[in-house]
């Protein structure tokens, strides 16, 4: 499973990082991104973290965390953590 955060939908609530600190981090504006692949959605979620991922995924109040069984295309809404 692959995941990324859609920054336009993130309200910087902090829940995903609370639920899965190994997967989610925040940029300087508090907007979340997936830290295992810099929010590209191209690195599989480690099996050991799937439970935490699901917890974060279902906790996100805005649906900003998206997931896919296949890698996301790099061209899809380029995220820019820290920008
Ligand atoms: S849980 Fe959702 S809205 Fe909250 S910080 Fe994470 S991605 Fe953003």
Image (cartoon, rainbow, N blue to C red):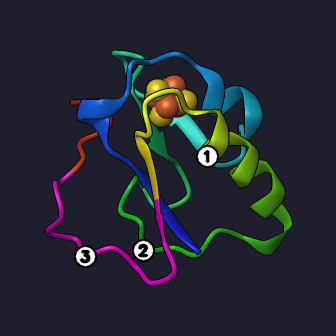
Q: Which mark is residue 42?
A: 2
Q: Residue at x 76, y 63 (%)?
A: 50
Q: Residue at x 82, y 56 (%)?
A: 51
How many numbered marks are there?
Answer: 3
Residue that numbered label 3 is attached to: 73
Q: Which residues are magenta?
A: 67-78
Residue that numbered label 1 is attached to: 57
Q: Residue at x 39, y 53 (%)?
A: 39
| Snapshot quadrant of residue 73 | bottom left
Residue lying furthest bottom in this view? 70
Query: In the displayed structure, would residue 48 be above or below residue 32?
Result: below
Can residue 26 be seen at all in this image of the molecule? Answer: no
Nearest to viewer (mark 1 / mark 3): 1
Query: In the displayed structure, would residue 15 be above or below residue 36?
Result: above
Residue 1 pos. (x, y %): 59, 75
Q: Quadrant of the C terminus?
A: top left
As measured in the structure, the alpha-carbon distance from the residue carrying label 3 to the one carrying label 2 is 8 Å
Nearest to viewer (mark 2 / mark 1): 1
Pointer 3: residues within 10 angstroms few (<14), some, or many (20+)?
few
Q: Is mark 1 within 8 Å of ligand 1?
A: no
First-in-chain label (2 vs 1)? 2
Instruction: Please report contact status of discs 2 and 1: CB closer than 8 Å, yes or no.
Output: no
Residue 6 is left or right of residue 35, and the answer is left
């Amino acid at each position: 499973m692959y995941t990324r955060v859609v920054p336009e939908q993130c309200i910087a609530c902090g829940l995903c990082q609370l639920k899965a600190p190994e997967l989610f981090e925040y940029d300087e504006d508090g907007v979340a991104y997936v830290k295992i692949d810099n929010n590209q959605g191209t690195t599989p979620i480690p099996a050991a973290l799937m439970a935490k991922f699901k917890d974060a995924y279902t906790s996100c109040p805005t649906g900003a965390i998206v997931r896919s069984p296949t890698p996301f295309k790099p061209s899809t809404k380029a995220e820019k953590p820290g920008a």
